Amino acid sequence: MTAANSLAPMADPKHAYCNGNHTVHANHGKNGLSTRNGLSKTIQNGTANGGTLYKKPFNESFEEAPMYVAVLTYIGFGVVTLFGYLRDFMRSWGLEKCHMAEEREEQKDFVPLYQDFENFYTRNLYMRVRDNWNRPICSVPGAQFDLMERLTDDYNWTYRHTGRAIKDVINMGSYNYLGFAEIDEESLGTVKDMVISYGAGVCSSRQEMGHLDKHEELEDLVAKFLNVEAAMVFGMGFATNSMNIPALVGKGCLILSDELNHTSLVLGARLSGATIRIFKHNNMQNLEKLLREAVINGQPRTHRAWKKILILVEGIYSMEGSIVRLPEIIALKKKYKAYLYLDEAHSIGAVGATGRGVVQYFGLDPTDVDVLMGTFTKSFGSAGGYIAGKKELVTFLRSHSHSAVYATSMSPPVTEQIIRVMKCIMGRDGTLIGMQRVNQLAENTRYFRKRLQDMGFITYGNEDSPVVPVLLYMPGKVGAFARHMLEKKIGVVVVGFPATPITEARARFCISAAHTREMLDKVLDALNEMGDFLRLKYSRHSKSDRLPPSDETDYELDA
């Protein structure tokens, strides 16, 4: 039985198109953004049937860099690229040793495996700043951690460890949003007992001998936490997306995917065999255009109606720090009878009054989202992921998902860690610790973002997002920034091509409830100093200079 003709609630093709009898409406800025004087901002409100789609202000900023920054960034990449070709020429003549993988002599006439731009980029550009990535840590990744000291004698091609550790580095890179990646012996008592009672692993899949009572307890708890009918858990967050999407859609189905979706969503969409079309990030006009064309034109060549139309989005986008425009997407999916798959990997636990993610953040009904997906690797300090929604959906996935049928079950101590944290957030442990951490994360996020904006840095994303990208742009400044911050005992994550556009290299800060105000102030003081030293304060607008969002166009949506 295929996904297209199964009994899953998403599998009824008669609900995959619209009869055109819909009259609703919402305000939206042009291209989803309002750009003035180089400052891009999303609008705040949308309306449907005279009501308000957004129940609270929705503020995001994507300020463009001054023109000279973009020009210097391109020049910088041009210079290192020219030197890269020069060094490749020297390597080909034996004037410089080549450390990269090479074809064997007897395979020289084969089609080369390694001759592409990505390999050129890695060899000649990435290698110059490689010391800023893959640093081994030797402690719990809490608000502070220890790093293993390492040195290189051949310009980052290889490393040797000195046996020493860099102690008490402030961790600004881990997704430890609520601070539950911890070593509190009292809190972890139940996890310790679980290892003693159940062992460390299951050694079987859920379909065979790997179905534990703790898995059922966790799934029931997740369903109650999300206020849905049922849930199913998986041992790996990445596989939760990549292995479940192919079970829900297939040939003859259409996937509409946000251009900034995570690789796991992209891989799942490709594996499904469905037709994939990309819409601009958080751009509701572009999404509606694709939906309308899909309903009117149907499938290519045959023009038959699509069996299913599935919209793939994330709650918080981990490279941009932006939050999905969920009220408008739900209105659109209702208008065109499409299905919605929401990945809350970074938003569950991190936003919402009680940590229930973007659905709660916008005050929406969870039943309006057909497939709720999330991971336990961020806010819950554990591993794995979940799919939640209607009971029929979960029942279908238990027998059709490759991850459910073939993958090893979630480890018992990992399961217990998730249960422990989820009960803490829900207040079922008899304390207010969970709620205090949710509130502390929100407070830390707003404080950190406001201070950065006041200093003059260009930051991306929503004001309530704990993912805070700070734009660095120029390749030479990326490595210098990370190295200088580490000298100040601050661990940061710097990101560049291919994870971001080649001209938008950035430092990505992940705020945690475990960060104290003293820690954040130390980081902010160091950033202020580095911003002046490396000239990173590119913003031309202080917070008070920012213009209110404008409504440039109107279009209709179903509520």
Image (cartoon, helix red, strand yellow):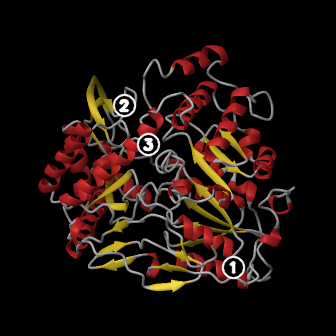
Q: Is residue 19 above or below residue 325?
A: below
Tell me which label, 1 or 2, sits earlier in the chain: 2
- The location of residue 473, given as percent across then percent down, is 27, 62
The amino acid type, in three-letter code, at marker 1 is Ala
Q: Nearer the viewer, residue 12 or 237?
A: 12
Q: Nearer the viewer, residue 134 or 143?
A: 143
| Numbered badge on residue 438 | 3
Q: Nearer the viewer, residue 230 or 485?
A: 230
The amino acid type, in three-letter code, at marker 2 is Ile
Label 3 packing within 10 angstroms: few (<14), some (14-19), many (20+): many
Eye-nearest disc, 3 or 1: 3
Q: Answer with left or right where residue 217 lies relative to residue 445.
A: right
* Cα gap from disc 1 to disc 2, whole angstroms: 49 Å
Q: Secondary structure at mark 1?
A: helix
Residue position marked by numbered label 2 in the rendering: 137
- The location of residue 218, given as percent across then percent down, is 66, 34
Eye-nearest disc, 1 or 2: 1
Tell me which label, 3 or 1, sits earlier in the chain: 1
Q: In the image, what residue occupies the spot 26% across and 72% down?
A: 546
- The location of residue 182, given as percent across then percent down, is 42, 28
Instruction: Tell me the quadrant of the picture where the N terminus can be found.
Output: bottom right
Eye-nearest disc, 2 or 3: 3
Contact (CB < 8 A) between labels 3 and 1? no
Q: Is residue 270 visible?
A: no
Residue position marked by numbered label 1 in the rendering: 294
Q: In the image, what residue occupies the spot 32% across and 34% down?
A: 159
Q: Secondary structure at mark 3?
A: helix
The amino acid type, in three-letter code, at marker 3 is Val
Q: Secondary structure at mark 2?
A: loop
Tell me which label, 2 or 3, sits earlier in the chain: 2
Label 2 packing within 10 angstroms: few (<14), some (14-19), many (20+): some
